[in-house]
Structure formats: structure tokens, C-alpha cells
Image (tube, coloured by chain):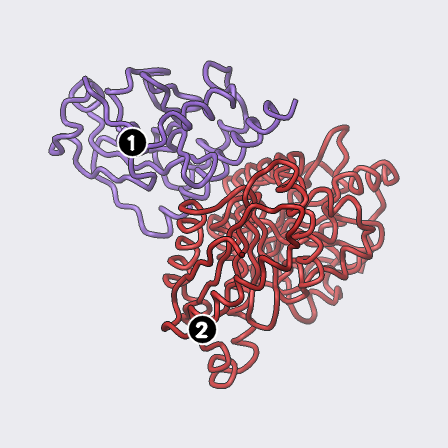
Chain colours: A red, B purple
């Protein structure tokens, strides 16, 4: 196996990567969309936005494989960043550089690969957008052009800051290691700890700007049945699928976090009343329509909107949302119940 | 001609203006979206359109014969009313569109499919649309792909808006 070369501008490259503050962050729709498009247009089971860090490659987005990162020395993407041209491997087993690579000889059994480096300014290649197949194949020039265009979109997204100010501040304040501890490993959303910190920040921002905030708790209906009847692997797929679906249909400034076993927290800044109702109804509609690995589920939502003031604490908005969720379950599930401004 | 406008027309126009994207030169980010749509869905006519107060302005296109037309001459002004995808299988047989220049005229564009380009979920500023002279069918998957592309364009326009607002 050939270990990847280290690029000449490695120090500068790592600094640039650090500045982006993207490593060890939750998944975001703007990258999910791109990897989804890779799978669809190139007809591959696995696609990823990979960022090549000092000792590892970390996936900002990955479809078809449930892995957060791998070590750098076995990463195909670490080879890809050494040149500006597309890096293509038609049959990894027949390639002297990769035939004994553990990613090839065992799960996920990579057989073919096409990666386009993602270059920010000064030709610093931070990672790749890649398509991976489990059978050998050639990628046509047309397919490589499509992949290059999608890589262009991914690069544009790397460069633009779209998240809510609170989210950006939170990510900037935490050290990488701290961030990693606040992310749920199954869904790659903020976990409860991360969600609490984020809610504090959104609360402060809402107070400062005198805008309303809506908090909603989403609980998957009859989830225990899914686990009992179909097994935990199936249940995990549903959880991941719900996470991605909710993310896809909220605004970029909204946050969805994993709050509990089958419970998610959504924070919608500068949103209340009719707007909040429409946004949450849309989420439920898409969940109803979606099949998660052949499984259909519904969800119940309890929501609460309010204008944060000095007198109230963020916890005071979660309790009413929780009570509303209970109400939604009791009333028959697969619905939203709103609480009004807590007293 | 009286044009039916969406309820949030004032906010819509305000966002569109703040994005400072009207009357700007060709940009690769948008050309790329048009190129992908044509290539993957196999159309030779595609446009990213922005619906302004009284005109339709084209930000990026392929195989189209105009950069700007009066608003009431477009499919897109109708498409943004419902803020969802619009498929017109036979424009000449549709009373909303049969009088349009591009349907009646030399080009005879009889088929239209467009997905809204949104700055935020309820604010469509324009459409990503594909045209043909004959009827075409798009699968649900293909329509979802077109919407993903439209969302990419929307994402870029929103970035622009935020940059302008914060600077």
C-alpha cells in the first residue's frame, strides 16, 4: 500500500482548514445536498465531502456509509489532494497503491473511486468531493465534468458562512475536541449538550435583537415498535433518516439537534406564529412521505414560541414545548401542538 | 396586462433587490447550475430567471433567446405564485400560456418545467427552468434533482444577500 504524500504547502493548508471551522461540526443541508446529487447523477452508492486533516480525513458529509473519519494514511482523498486534476481509480484491487488498503480488502470494500480536490484560495486543496463504488468501473469524461461542477458548488459552500450567528459563535468558541464531544455520533447533529449551549446562544441573540424564537420537540411515533420488530439497525436508519429529512426542510439558520433516544430539538430563531406553524407542518409532511430504508413513520411535535426577556430562561421554553408534545401524543400522534407564550 | 402577484410580493422584491443580483454579469456559479441541469436531464434550453417587479431577468442560461422579457410574457411569474414546481406539458393548450410570445413565436416552446429558487422557504425570487418544443416527462427523482439544483442557486443568492446586509 502506498501512503499518501504530504503536499508542499501542508502547514498553510492546515491553517486554512482550521480557519474554516468546519471540522467536527454537525451535518448541514448545503453539503448533504451536494453528496446526494453525486449519488444520483453518477449512480454511486457512496459519496462524500472529505476534509483532509493532519492525521485523518473527516467527512463533512457522507452518503451511503456511516463513518465520521478514517486515518489519513489509508484515505484515497489524501492522494487526491496532491494534484489539481481529478483522481480516479477504476479498480482498486488491481492498483498497486491500493490493493491491500483495508478500505478495499474489508468493509466498505471500495473498488472504484473518483475524487475532485476542493481548492480554496492560493491553490490550497483542503479535501475532496468524491464518488465511490463497490464494483470496478470507469468514470466517463462526462461524469467527471459533472463531478467537477458539483465540486465547484462544494467549494463555494466551503467559502460562505450561512449558519446563524449563534451557531458560528458557538463553533468558534469551542476547541475542536470540545466540539466533537457535543456531536451525536449516530445522526451527526448536535447532541443534547450541544443543543443546550446553542439554545443559550440563540436566546441571547433573540434578546439582543428583540425577535421571537420558536422551540420544538419532535418525537418519532411508535419508535419502540420499530426497534422491537425490526431491530436496532433498522431503528438507527430511521433516526439518521429523520435527522437528514428535518435538516433538509428547515432554513439554514434553524438548528435541529438530537435531544434524546428518539427525540429531536428544533430551534427556529426569529420565527413565531404562522411562520413557525408552516415550517413545522412542512417537516411533518415530508416525514410522512418519506421511506426510511423501506420503513414509514410519523412524528409528533410539541412547540412553543416566545419573546425572550430578562426574566425568562431558555428552560422556560422547553417545558411548555414538552407539555405540548405530550398533548400531541395523547391527541393521536402525527401532529403538532403549539403552546402560547409561557406565563 | 394585470399580473397576479404572490402575497409576499413586497418582501420578495425587497430581498431580490438587496441581493444585488439583477443586471449583473455572467457568473460561473450560476452557469454551472444551468450546465448541470442541461447535461443531467438532457435539455438544450435552461435558464435561471429572476422575477422582478415588471420584468423577468435571466441570470444564466443555455439555448435561450432572451436576457429579459416583460413579466407578463413569462411562465415563471405564474410558477412563483404557488412556490412549488410547475410542469406545463402543453403550453399551446393552456389558456394561461398559449398567448406567450415564446409559445406562439418562432421558437414554439411548448414544454416548461421549473423549480422555485428560494432565498428562504417562503420567498421565491425566481425559477430554475427547462424548456422544450415537445412534451417531456420527468420522474419524481429528476424533479427532486432539479429542485436540489434550484436550492443550490438559492443558497448562493442568499449568501450574497447576507453579505450585502452585514457589510
- In the rendered structure, the residue with mark 2 lies on which chain? A
Query: Residue A18's spot in the image, x, y percent?
Result: 80, 42
Residue A145 got which mark?
A: none
Quarter of the figure with residue B160: top right
Looking at the picture, tell me which residue is in the foreground, B22 or A114. B22
Q: How far from the left and from the top, in percent, is residue B47?
A: 38, 27
Looking at the rendered structure, the secondary structure element under dot 1 is strand
Mark 1 surroundings: few (<14), some (14-19) or many (≥20) residues within 10 A: many
**In the shown orientation, is residue A113 left or right of residue B53?**
right
Question: Disc 2 and disc 1: Cα gap in Å?
Answer: 43 Å
Across and down, in percent, residue A63 comes to 57, 58
Q: Are marks 2 and 1 in contact (CB under 8 Å)?
A: no
User: Measuring 72% from the left and 46% from the top, which residue is drawn there?
Assistant: A22
Judge from the rendering whether residue A314 lies leftward or rightward of residue A44; answer left or right: right
Give the residue drawn at x 50%, y 51%.
A248
Is residue A223 something that shows in the picture? yes
Front-lying residue, A51 or A95: A51
The answer to which image quadrant residue A134 occupies is bottom right
Q: From the image, which quarter does the N terminus of chain A lie in? A: bottom right
Q: Which residue is mark 2?
A: A221
Q: Reply above or below: A120 against A49.
A: above
Q: Is residue A77 above or below residue A325?
A: above
Subunit of mark 1? B
Please give the residue where the numbered disc 1 appears in the rendered image.
B131
User: In terms of secondary structure, where does tag 2 sit?
Assistant: loop
Amino acid at each position: 500500500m502506498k501512503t499518501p504524500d504530504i503536499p508542499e504547502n501542508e502547514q498553510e493548508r492546515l491553517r486554512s482548514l482550521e480557519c474554516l471551522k468546519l471540522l467536527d461540526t454537525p451535518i448541514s443541508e448545503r453539503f448533504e445536498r451536494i453528496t446526494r446529487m453525486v449519488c444520483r447523477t453518477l449512480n454511486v452508492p457512496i459519496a462524500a465531502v472529505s476534509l483532509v486533516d493532519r492525521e485523518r480525513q473527516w467527512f463533512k458529509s457522507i452518503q451511503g456509509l456511516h463513518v465520521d473519519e478514517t486515518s489519513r494514511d489509508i484515505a484515497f482523498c489524501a492522494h487526491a489532494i496532491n494534484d489539481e486534476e481529478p483522481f480516479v481509480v477504476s479498480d482498486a484491487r488491481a492498483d498497486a497503491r491500493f490493493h491491500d488498503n483495508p478500505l478495499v480488502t474489508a468493509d466498505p470494500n471500495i473498488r472504484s473511486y473518483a475524487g475532485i480536490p476542493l481548492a480554496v484560495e492560493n491553490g490550497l486543496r483542503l479535501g475532496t468531493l468524491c464518488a465511490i463504488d463497490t464494483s470496478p468501473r470507469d468514470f466517463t469524461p462526462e461524469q467527471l465534468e459533472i463531478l467537477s461542477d458539483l465540486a465547484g458548488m462544494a467549494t463555494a459552500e466551503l467559502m460562505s458562512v450561512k449558519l446563524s450567528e449563534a451557531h458560528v459563535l458557538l463553533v468558534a468558541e469551542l476547541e475542536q475536541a470540545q466540539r466533537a464531544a457535543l456531536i451525536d455520533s449516530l445522526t451527526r447533529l448536535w447532541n443534547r449538550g450541544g443543543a443546550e449551549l446553542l439554545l443559550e446562544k440563540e436566546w441571547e441573540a433573540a434578546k439582543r435583537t428583540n425577535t421571537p424564537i420558536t422551540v420544538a420537540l419532535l418525537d418519532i411515533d411508535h419508535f419502540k415498535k420499530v426497534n422491537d420488530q425490526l431491530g436496532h439497525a433498522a431503528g438507527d436508519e430511521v433516526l439518521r433518516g429523520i435527522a437528514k429529512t428535518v435538516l433538509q426542510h428547515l432554513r439554514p439558520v434553524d438548528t435541529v439537534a438530537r435531544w434524546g433516544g428518539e427525540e429531536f430539538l428544533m430551534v427556529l430563531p426569529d420565527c413565531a406564529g404562522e411562520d413557525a406553524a408552516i415550517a413545522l407542518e412542512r417537516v411533518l409532511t415530508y416525514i410522512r412521505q418519506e421511506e426510511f430504508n423501506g420503513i414509514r413513520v410519523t412524528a409528533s411535535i410539541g412547540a412553543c414560541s416566545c419573546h425572550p426577556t430578562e426574566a425568562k430562561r431558555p428552560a422556560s421554553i422547553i417545558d411548555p414545548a414538552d407539555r405540548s408534545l405530550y398533548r400531541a401524543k395523547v391527541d393521536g400522534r402525527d401532529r403538532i401542538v403549539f403552546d402560547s407564550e409561557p406565563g | 396586462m394585470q399580473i397576479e402577484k404572490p402575497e409576499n410580493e413586497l418582501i420578495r422584491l425587497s430581498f431580490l433587490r438587496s441581493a444585488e443580483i439583477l443586471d449583473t454579469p455572467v457568473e460561473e456559479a450560476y452557469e454551472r447550475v444551468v450546465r448541470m441541469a442541461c447535461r443531467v436531464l438532457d435539455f438544450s434550453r435552461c435558464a435561471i430567471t429572476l422575477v422582478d417587479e415588471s420584468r423577468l431577468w435571466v441570470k444564466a442560461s443555455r439555448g435561450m433567446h432572451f436576457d429579459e422579457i416583460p413579466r407578463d410574457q413569462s411562465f415563471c411569474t405564474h410558477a412563483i405564485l404557488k412556490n412549488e414546481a410547475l410542469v406545463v406539458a402543453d403550453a399551446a393548450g393552456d389558456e394561461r400560456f398559449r398567448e406567450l410570445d415564446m409559445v406562439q413565436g418562432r421558437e414554439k416552446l411548448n414544454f416548461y418545467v421549473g423549480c422555485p429558487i428560494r432565498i428562504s422557504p417562503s420567498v421565491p425570487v425566481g425559477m430554475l427552468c427547462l424548456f422544450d418544443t415537445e412534451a417531456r416527462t420527468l420522474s419524481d427523482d429528476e424533479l427532486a434533482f432539479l429542485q436540489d439544483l434550484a436550492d443550490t442557486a438559492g443558497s448562493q443568492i442568499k449568501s450574497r444577500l447576507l453579505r450585502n446586509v452585514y457589510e
